[in-house]
Amino acid sequence: MSDLNRPKMSSLEELRHSAAHVMAAAVLRLFPNAKLDIGPPTDSGFYHDFDLDHRFTIEDLLKIEEEMKKIIKENQKFERILVSREEAAKFLTERNQSYTLTRLADIPEGAPITLYRNGEFTNLCAGTHVSYTKQIKAFKLLSIAGSYFRGDENNKQLQRIYGTAFPSKEELDAHLHQSEEAKNRDHRKIGKELQLFHIDDTVGNGLILWLPRGAILRKQLQAFISKELERQGYEEVFTPHIGKLGLYRTSGHFPYYSDSQFPPLIERDSLQQLAKENKSIKELSASIKNGAVDGYLLKPMNCPMHAKIYASQTRSYRELPVRLSEFGTVYRWEQSGELTGMTRVRGFTQDDAHIFCTEDQVQQEIQGCLELVKIILKTLGMHNYRVRVGLRDPDSSKYTGSAELWNKAENALIAIAKSLGVSFTTEPGEAAFYGPKIDFIVKDVINREWQLGTIQVDYNLPIRFNLTYIGSDNKEHRPVMIHRAPFGSWERFIGVLIEHFGGNFPTWLAPEQIRILCINDDLLPYAQKIHDLFQSKGFRSSIDKHSDKLGAKIRRAELIKIPHMIIIGTKEAENKTISVRSRNHKKLESITQLDEFITAFDQEITNRTLPDSF
């Protein structure tokens, strides 16, 4: 069964959707007792969910692939069969396909209900498919994972088989090569190898523990962006990790954003009173929603508190724009099955800022935000990106504010996007609940897309918080609020950065920049002098004092991807010279004089030079 009410598929989606059906047919041939759930195409392939007592293995995937090849060779025709709701229910009940039967209820009344058949396999499906199975030329089953029915961890866990399919073997091979490269660059693997971060079940899934080396990386990025913020006239602020529920009722995060929040923290006196009254959880929930019970919320966003900082004093038009920045930690509730290392977490720190300005300052301020994003991406070698303008979905009720204000904000953002000189797309449904936004969708070195920097124009929160400034006419006016986060969050951005560089960071970012290796222990005093000199210059250096051979020391430094090594032998100690081995810049290997190396190294850091591979 596929996703219901799906818009018309592309030819690639049809191919992958058809491959998912062929995979389900093959599974039923090999495991007739399997129960089926959904099997849609995805951006990178397809998957299908199964309920089966037998646990799938890698060996099973090979057997399923062989059976799929037989089905493809049989050149089965995909047939669309229009049925009534009663006929579909009878068909699924007779075949004991209880999961698919529940999906039947998702189809709206009056919508067509169809089965698709290829060979002996038939299932509920909205389509569409290729005409014959032989059109599936190149496919591969990739992995097995657990998945909860309907994505709810309170439901039974099913087994999910992932696969991919392409029109040609060449395209499939290229994709598999890219996937293998992505595995090698996985930030969870590299983060562990380089001792950057740790996730501990006893602390909580989706909560990152920054290890000392990872903290250095984060601090270097923070220092970099802080200098740019100072240059653009931002003022840094600090706000608490929790705030009263009333604050978020005013902002609209509660209830508009409630599905993505941690449950409220109820005041102790209120909780004790409700316990005395023997209130149920349902009654407690209703009391929280209607405001009868007060409490606190783990901060899901920084903007309400920044609005309060702006409102803490009378503002004149002469002061505007007011630019408030904060490296603020926020908390979002994500399903446990959706958590992914550092790129999908429950607690994260944003390089957040909010600009309060007049309407005629909006374009200039957004240009400044865009300049900041461009500086960051250029410095980090992320040259391949596109711009997405996220608009509201006119059919959704998740947005706050009047249509008039939304139109004004969307038109302003589209006009600014046109002035960028880069291609952009407008995508309904991608706006924040309070305003439209510009997102930077960045391609990394292996052509995967990531949504990183974001800029949002907001006419609504200034109204909700009654923000004003005194204009030149001595009357109160409403400011416009711009939300912007060039990095997005440290956790996600650094997770992407680890994979972008494969852990081979530019020297200015590397937790350890130089390691000094001695051929024998007699040379340690000379190594210590070099180390002390490096540290006095602010370089992050160390000495490998292990007693093993030089080759082992080199290998150890390579494993944690240290950009530069200084190798000290007897000749170097006698002549007060050095021998350089570099991952990042081979031209440094010709340098033998310490002062010359320090000059070149210092210039590399000052210029934030990218590694040779970039």
Image (spheres, helix red, strand yellow):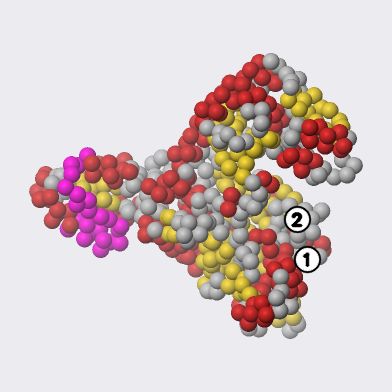
- Location of the C terminus by quadrant is top left
Residue type (three-letter) at the residue carrying disc 1: Gly
457 or 561, which lies in front? 561
188 or 440, which lies in front? 188
545 or 405, which lies in front? 545
- Location of the N terminus by quadrant is top right
- Check the image and name the residue furthest to the right: 110
User: What segment carries the magenta color?
Assistant: 529-551
Indicate the secondary structure of the residue bearing disc 1.
loop
5 or 474, which lies in front? 5
Q: Which mark is residue 401?
A: 1
The answer to whether any part of residue 568 appears in the image is no
Q: Position of residue 35 (x, y in %)?
A: 68, 35
Q: Quadrant of residue 33?
A: top right
Compared to residue 507, the image places residue 468 above or below, namely: below
Residue type (three-letter) at the residue carrying disc 2: Arg
